[in-house]
Image (cartoon, rainbow, N blue to C red):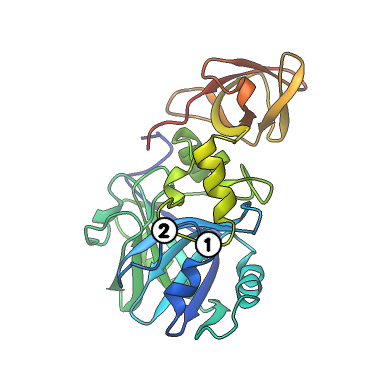
Amino acid sequence: MTTCLPPYGLAERSAGLLEITGADRQRFLNAYVTCDVKPLQPGDGAYGFFTNPQGRILSDVAVLVREDRLWLEVAPGLAETLAGHLRKFVIVDRVEIRPLEEVTLLTLIGPRAAEVLDLPDLLDWKHAPMTIDGIEAVVQRRGLLGAPAFSLWVPAASAPHLRASLLAREGVQPVGEEDLEILRVEAGIPRFGVDFGPENFPKETGLDEAVSYTKGCYLGQEVVARIHYRGGVQKMMRRLELEGDPRPGSKLLFEEREAGTATTVVRSPLSGRTLGLGIVHKRAAEPGTRLDVEGGGTATVEELPTR
């Protein structure tokens, strides 16, 4: 665990939130995401991608299956865009899709985060209702943040009060965006809109857990499956050890040819190293490969850590 993270931390993460209601909600959503939503029961959750017909990523998505609705966490600023995207496919489906503007997220994160509220023992992406200081919330075990974490889905009007109440508890400290970035880079976790985006296929991200290859048809499924089974991906996510003064967005060169981009760069308190993430062409992606950084410095390619 990095030295930048307290045992009990409270973070506010930017996210877009959506709600889908109606009798056909799970069958409908299952046709537009890479994770298998259809068999999930209330209290379950999943992580996946929205993909377009060409199999490229529109956003990542964390799904919560509630008793009578689905809640979705998507990339910041994309709630309305994705709502519009889904509405285009509603023909006879009994569903309603809308941005979930009256709810906000607080995130407890840290090696002992569950102890702050005596939280239930949940597997990643599962969730449960909970009353916290008189406020009704939904607590979700949140994966892919680089440390044990729980998202608290709370009424937006109550969020400031709950935030202040949690920070008043002994040992709870605020966790900033910089700390969250260090955590995920150390763990080799890329972020949509930073390390990958609409130009990328799921296989290029290294987030294999986001894709079910057994669920059947969904928008873009044929392309995603073909790349997976035929090994057609030309680029792949890698962690980088950087030397010099690299900046996010710096081009990576191998044998004097462009081979990728350093998308995120952080200074790791855990290792004392400068680390980064980047999608690198397969000809330069072998661990141990040394790359030149445009503008000065070098990068050594590393495998993504096992999560």
In the picture, measured across the screen, residue 94 lies left or right of residue 89, that is left
The three-letter amino acid code for the residue at tag 1 is: Tyr
Image quadrant where one finds the C terminus: top left
Which residue is at 49% across, 57% downward? 34
Where residue 159 appears, as percent x and y from the top left, is: 45, 71
Which residue is at 63% across, 32% downward? 234
Give above or below for 159 relative to 126.
below
Q: Which dot marks residue 218? A: 1
In the picture, measured across the screen, residue 157 lies left or right of residue 126, that is right
Under circle 2, the secondary element is loop
**Residue 99 appears in which quarter of the rendering?**
bottom right
Give above or below for 14 relative to 143.
below
Q: Are marks 1 and 2 in contact (CB under 8 Å)?
A: yes
The three-letter amino acid code for the residue at tag 2 is: Lys
Where residue 101 appears, as percent x and y from the top left, is: 55, 77
Under circle 1, the secondary element is loop
**Residue 35 appears in which quarter of the rendering?**
bottom left
Where residue 114 appears, as percent x and y from the top left, is: 27, 55
